[in-house]
Amino acid sequence: MNFSKNEYKDRLKKVQQSMQDKGIELLISQDTANINYLTGYDAWSFYYAQCVIVHVNADEPICFIRAQDAGGAFIKTYLKKENIIIYDEKYIHTWPLHPYDALVHLIKKNKWDKLNIGVEMDAHYFTAYCYEKLKQGLPNASIIDSERLVNWVRFVKSDAEIDFMKKAAVISENAMRTAMEIINPGIRQCDAVAEIQKSLFKGTSEYGGEYASITTLLPTGKGTSASHLTASDEKFKKSEATVVELSGTYKRYHAPMARTVNLGKPEKKKIDAMNATNEALEAGIEASKPGNTANDVAQNFWNVLDKYNIKKESRTGYSIGLGYPPDWGEHTVNISKGDMTILKPNVCYHMIAVMQFGEWGVEASESIRITEDGNELLCNFSRDLHVK
């Protein structure tokens, strides 16, 4: 277990309180990060059906898992053996049979089939087929969207979680340092990412890293005008800029960071755009304090962009922490105008400024923790345009 049993119990109580508030008697959580958060389970098994079941009065959750992955559940979770429920391999890719047939049977066996059941309608890996199996198999139940209930419980981190994120941040710094060293004219993008990934997994001499929820992103040249591009086997070219976005990961906790490097003397427009980007980020960081809202942070950020007549339509931040592919975001707060979520100590978010101008762009970001009297940046790495 990565956390004390008391911490897992406290998480369960918070989830059950939220269930009561929403009128949910049974929660089926399919979000991979939520499964880890509630039980400690951690394996690359999320590509097929698995979930955690929480009864509003239960002492422990139930981990519903494929037989082939049962060993991992016994090793990784804090749960009693009887709360790890295994479904047979006969349900794997043998349509119309499906693991949720076994889940429906479990719910009926426990006489939960007439309860108000919450499911995570927009969770990754909760398919339309899963939903249809529940609807057809439990006609007497009321099946409703839990509206990211567990995600919102995760929103305020424990001190133990913050410690993991700080460890991830050091790995981020090391990997970004590697990126800035290895990116040079004539080097293939894939070779650069190979070295970056090595840094991300190697971690530090005290602790190692692991795979991130999002692969290293590497828009280069004209690609800096687009988002979420990955490395190819093309070579870096002199005069072109490259955006590097990555995250160190420690026990599934993330601290993302984005920076921009330019090979050769940059054009003035890139320098000016980078300066404006950093000024906007700094304004957002200044407003990042307890009692303020996500809207307050966003307004400060966009006031700077308005001053320079820079248009940006996308949000400029989102909550982070525990994550699995395909996303390290928590799917709760957005740092955007109109989001009135109140910031509290130990809320963490990735504030990212993606500035795109037709055929070029620059980018920088910070992972920010709200403290008792302000904020702290998890990573310590210059946001200036890195010129080589």
Image (cartoon, rainbow, N blue to C red):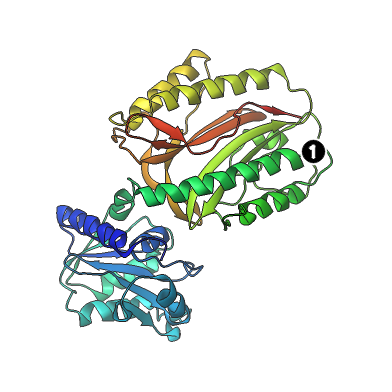
Residue reaching furthest front? 206
**Residue 142 visible somewhere in the drawing:** yes
**Residue type at the position of mark 1:** Asn
Viewed as shown, does residue 340 lie left or right of 327?
left
Q: Position of residue 277 (x, y in %)?
A: 55, 24
**Quadrant where the N terminus lies?**
bottom left
Which residue in the rendered view is the most extreme toward the right?
186
**Residue at x 65% of width, y 47% of height:** 230
Image coordinates for residue 147, horizontal then vertical, percent: 28, 52
Residue in the picture at 61% in, 23% down: 274
Q: Choose between 11 and 307: the one closer to the eye.
A: 11
Instruction: Tell me residue 75's x, y (percent).
Output: 44, 75
Q: Residues within 10 Å of mark 1 (few under 14, many from 20)?
A: many
Is residue 355 left or right of 223 when viewed as pictured?
A: left
- Residue 20 position in % (x across, y down): 15, 57
Q: Residue at x 41, y 77 (%)?
A: 74
Q: Residue furthest top?
A: 307
> Is 61 or 174 nearer to us in this picture?
174
Q: Considering the numbered disc 1 on the image, is that residue within a helix, a strand or a loop?
A: loop
Quadrant housing residue 114: bottom left
The quadrant of the image that shows the C terminus is top right
Residue placed under numbered mark 1 in the picture: 184
